[in-house]
Image: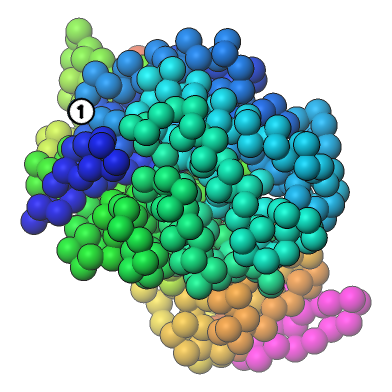
Amino acid sequence: MLKNLFSPIKIGNLKIANRAVVTAMVTNYCNSDGTATERYIAYHEAKAKGGWGLIITEDYAVDPTGKGFSCVAGLWDDSQIESHSKLTKRIHTYNCKVFAQIYHCGRQTSHLITGSQPLAPSPIPCPSMQETPHEMSLDEIHTMVEKFGDCALRAKKAGFDGVEVHGAHGYLIAEFMSPYSNKRTDIYGGNLTNRIRFAIEVVENIRAKTGKDFVIGFRISADEFVPGGRTIEDTKTIAILLQQAGVDVLHISAGVYASADKIVPPSAVPHGWAVDFAAEVKKVVTIPVITVGRINDPLVAEGILASGKADLIGMGRASLADPELPKKAAAGDYNDIVQCIGCIQGCLGTLFADQPIKCVLNPTLGKETEMAIKQSEISKKVLVVGGGPAGMEAAITAARAGHMVQLFEKTDRLGGQFLLASIPPGKGEISSFVAWQIKQLSKLNVSVFLNTVATPETIDKLKPDVVIVATGSKPITPKIPGVDKSNVVSVYNVLLGKVSVGNKVVVVGGGLAGAETANHLANHGKSVVLVEALPEIAPGEQGIPRTYLLKALEAGNVKTYTETTVKEILDDGMVVVKDGKEKVIEADTVILAVGSTSENRLVSQLEGKPYKVVTIGDAVNVRTALEAVSEGYEAGMMV
């Protein structure tokens, strides 16, 4: 099935075992001085063990002024070589090659990170950062070219098989190449030949310092998706010039910070959406081309390769969700692969807060050593109450540790909040994680009891050693006159298909559940009104997915009322109050989505029992799936 994905390829004179590539992603796992930590090394080593052919590490700053985050890797000084040499030695223990991506953030950083004014070709702020950069002088440009070359040489001394020059995503080299950010009129600005000069000089400097056999890759945004930015036709021309300058492999991405959804596309974006950009570049060069863009399935990767649109497949976020994706795919264990769901909660949400990255689906990310499951010397009897993502994760982890596990779920199916979350448009892949968890429960012989309420009496009779309470949350019913009418239903029941709704619908509550449900119903041809007491719709959602959600609501003609309260629910609608004025909204069905509260009565009922009781997930406090899955894993590991 995967003969193309698992065929070797040569980049320059370097042989890569297969076509599966871990693309560069900032982790914030290094020390603030740019040196590698054990956490950073173990994170990459897990991927090498997992069968990836090539790992491209995160942005190595060529100078402290080029850092985009506090704890990125760096090779701007010889003193940093030793720590990163440990990384390459560990990676090379496996049949895996490793490149260091090298970059300067340019104007897409802040003095709060670097301690100095950002640098750029022109003194124009990045729309996302809003900090006016210093316009680089000719001497500063020439010095920066040398720093890129010196950084690459240090990467070679540290044992890297090559470097990838980061000329994409609006960073310094990209800023020079684009009329969007480069307004110079000297030899580094104006026409394309001048704007590409800095990039060409960087490549030539690296080649002169590292020699003819050291691999040089170049990452470029095919289209910047901003007014006045570069498009694919510009990029094809640049690709030809980069190959002539000595680049061995091109990595085709898209976007800048002002179009960040193109850099890290959310679940609403189709798989392989940017592959045709790579195909266009491949037509004009003879060197290998890497493609990216929401590719999270090895079978999809195989199809892209078979079509001839690219030579290697970048699956960055897919490698976060499951570092062992290639190994499992090679064995044909497709159902055992944890597929990235494009939520960007942990990989981007925490990073933009300048924190180390996480993954909703992989609680061991960045904790590969300390969170490894160890076989227990004593097999305990573990009872998990609740079959949502937290409960299932706890059951899976405890079973892997060698314990005897039973799971009780009061409804007729497993999945909990994840099952609900997978219903709206663009969120269907969430169900893949539910399916994965269910498969693991079966493989590990966890006894699952559906339609079963675990009472204190039931639990006592089973005589468990540990009870993990993962009973989740329940919807809040607001105290509104008319809330008990027959036309009022819960958002939970709507998403589960347990109730039918009329053609005219009002959703009360504009949080994520309410907004997603409004989008879901509009997508099914309903006339939808969304009422929210706060000033914004879905304020807690991550920035990029939220942008897509708001656009979808607009496209579905969902009428939104913010800063609006519900005074009374009627048989044919409701009375709302906005700006002190009452308004009647007609509706066949009123859907309540005003939030949830923890369902944890069982916890107090089990106080004083002879067994250990652990509470996790929404049963503790209603939060995100990131906390739920992580707490489930930890609870199962600590049994």
Choose top left, top right, bottom left or bottom right for residue 372: top left
Q: Overall secondary structure of the magenta stretch?
A: strand
Q: Residue at x 41, y 53 (%)?
A: 243
Q: Can you give x and y, in whole percent of width and height, for residue 236 in the image? A: 46, 66
Q: Can you give x and y, in whole percent of width and height, for residue 153 in the image? A: 49, 24
Query: Vertically, is 184 above or below 205?
Result: below
Choose top left, top right, bottom left or bottom right for residue 536: bottom right
The residue segment tinted magenta is: 566-586
Viewer-closest of 142 and 498: 142
Viewer-closest of 553 and 54: 54
* Amino acid type, callout 1: Asn
- Is residue 413 rendered to the left or right of residue 568? left
Q: Residue at x 42, y 39 (%)?
A: 216
Q: Residue at x 24, y 18 (%)?
A: 93
Choose top left, top right, bottom left or bottom right for residue 469: top left
Asked if residue 567 lies in the magenta stretch, the reply is yes
* Residue that badge 1 annotates: 95
Viewer-closest of 147 and 470: 147
State the quadrant of the C terminus.
top left
